[in-house]
Image (cartoon, grey):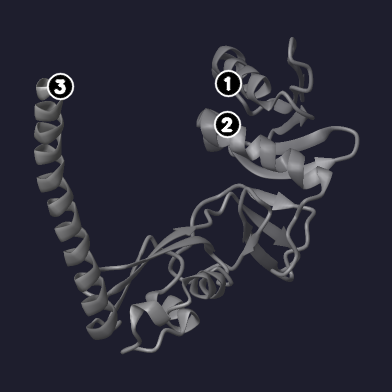
Amino acid sequence: MTTNNTANRNSGSRVLPWLTTTMMVIGVAVVAALYWNRHVTIEEMEVSGIYYTSQEQVIEMAAVPLGIKPDSLDLAQIVQQVEKLNYVKSVVPYVEPSGDLRLTITERQPLALLVDGSHRKYVDAEGVKLNIIDGKTTDLPIVYGFNAQTATDTLHSPAFTQIRDFLVHAKNNKFGWATISEIAYDKVDGVVALSHENGVKLLFGRNNFEIKLENWQAFYTEVIRSKGIKSMRQVDLRFTNQVVSRES
């Protein structure tokens, strides 16, 4: 019995300092939080992760009044407002201990250039149309056959899905990305592209684009480099196990 009582007293003596320290930490945190909420205000906004979007656009859309207290901010509304900007895909807000509001932005990345008569629009992998910003253009494959007059509707048709999947694989393939210039969708032939060099018509069909792009690279390496591309008119890559070419 004496041994048990001693053990209990030893256990209690160990718990008491820990409990006291914990309560002190909690107390300091509460005091700090109260001080922060009462005295810290938003005096500056930092924006990161932007290239196509300007900082002025983000600040204007966020509409955060300087001098407002952090606990009065509606962060969800700020995110919703900023995500209305054409190139903004997502926003992560964070209030620094100093009171600065930091917005970390992920922008949409153009995948292709839509050409519709005299109208031009970029489009990303989700089918979102993106405005072309002066001084921030990029060299991308040209895609025909889709509305580029407005930026309000998102492309999600089966034809665009096929072209999107092809472009994503082509970009990962690198060789395909470097050798293809123009793309369209045909109801019979599926994805149809023109080569950068000599404008050879390339038929990629539907699906299995990773394999077909590898076949295109192999055909270019083994056949075109030895025979030349000037006589080539069409390369049919619609079948995963064979390549059929047509020459003039």
Secondary element under disc 3, as helix, strand or loop, is loop
Distance Cα–Cα, label 1 vs label 2? 7 Å
The earlier-in-sequence mark between 3 and 1 is: 3
Q: Nearer the viewer, residue 96 or 155?
A: 96
- Residue drawn 45% across the image and 69% down it: 53
As displayed, is residue 6 above or below residue 40? above
Q: Which mark is residue 1?
A: 3
Q: Amino acid at mark 3?
A: Met
Residue 199 can be seen, yes or no: no
Quarter of the figure with residue 28: bottom left
Q: Residue at x 81, y 44 (%)?
A: 159
Considering every residue shown, the one lying at the far front of the view is: 1
| Residue 55: percent from left, percent from top | 38, 75
- Residue type, label 2: Gly
In this view, the residue in front, 15 or 191, is 15
How far, Cα to Cα, is label 3 from label 2? 83 Å
Residue type, numbered disc 1: Gln
Q: Is residue 74 above or below residue 96?
A: below
236 or 34, nearer to the observer: 34
Q: Residue 33, can we see it?
A: yes
Query: Image quadrant for the C terminus?
Result: top right
Rendering coords of residue 122 (x, y %): 61, 59
Q: Quadrant of residue 216?
A: top right
Which percent across, then down, holds residue 45?
32, 77
Which comes sooner in the sequence, label 1 or label 2?
2
Residue behind mark 1: 217
Answer whether labels 1 and 2 touch (C-beta < 8 Å): yes
Judge from the rendering whether residue 151 lies leftward or rightward of residue 92; answer left or right.
right
Q: Which mark is residue 176?
A: 2
Please tell me whether mark 3 or mark 2 is closer to you in this view.
3
Q: Can you give x and y, in whole percent of width and height, for residue 244 in the image?
A: 77, 16
Give neighbour class at mark 3: few <14, some 14-19, many 20+ (Cα, 10 Å). few
